[in-house]
Amino acid sequence: MSEADLEEIRKGRLAQLQQQQQSGSSGASGAGQDEQRRQQEAEARASILSQILQPEAADRLGRIRLVKESRATEIENRLIMLARSGQLRAKVTEDQLKELLGAVAENNERGGTAGGKIVVSRRKGGWDDDDDLLDL
């Protein structure tokens, strides 16, 4: 598909959504509008990501989403930001996505987020295995 085809599809979908919004806005409740807005945002994100990611990279991002949705959302936000600022010249490959994942993981480690750390706190002065010997 060429850029012109994608733009034509986007314009058609936008017109359809606007028409639905106009016809449904008179009787729709606030919660329904919020849900519709979220759905539109999700569709827009999916559309942008499909344009900037190669299929292998999109598959990898999907697998990451299954494991840790917050990490996938963070990567998507960065990719969309790069695309909007014009820093992406071509579609993102799987290797480029791996590099971005490494940079994000490194940034999170330096930032001090406790998302991946496991902290074990032991009780002091509690039961001890040596106390069993006193019972003999």
Image: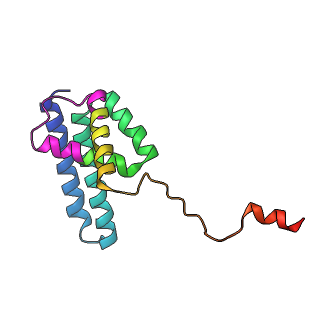
Q: Which of the two residues, 128 or 54, is positioned nearer the viewer here? A: 128
90 part of magenta stretch: yes
Q: From the viewer's perspective, is 14 left or right of 58?
A: left
Residue 24: where, in percent of width, then height?
A: 26, 65
The quadrant of the rendering that contains the C terminus is bottom right
Q: From the viewer's perspective, is 131 left or right of 103?
A: right
Q: Which residues are magenta?
A: 78-97
The structure residue drawn at horizontal position 9% and vertical position 39%, both measured from the top left corner, is: 86
Residue 112: where, in percent of width, then height?
A: 33, 56
Q: For residue 87, which quarter of the picture? A: top left
Residue 29: where, in percent of width, then height?
A: 31, 73
Residue 105: where, in percent of width, then height?
A: 33, 44
In this view, the residue farthest toward the left is: 86
Image vertical order of residue 32 relative to residue 70, above or below: below
The structure residue drawn at horizontal position 30% and vertical position 66%, both measured from the top left corner, is: 34
Q: Which of the two residues, 71 or 124, is positioned nearer the viewer here? A: 124
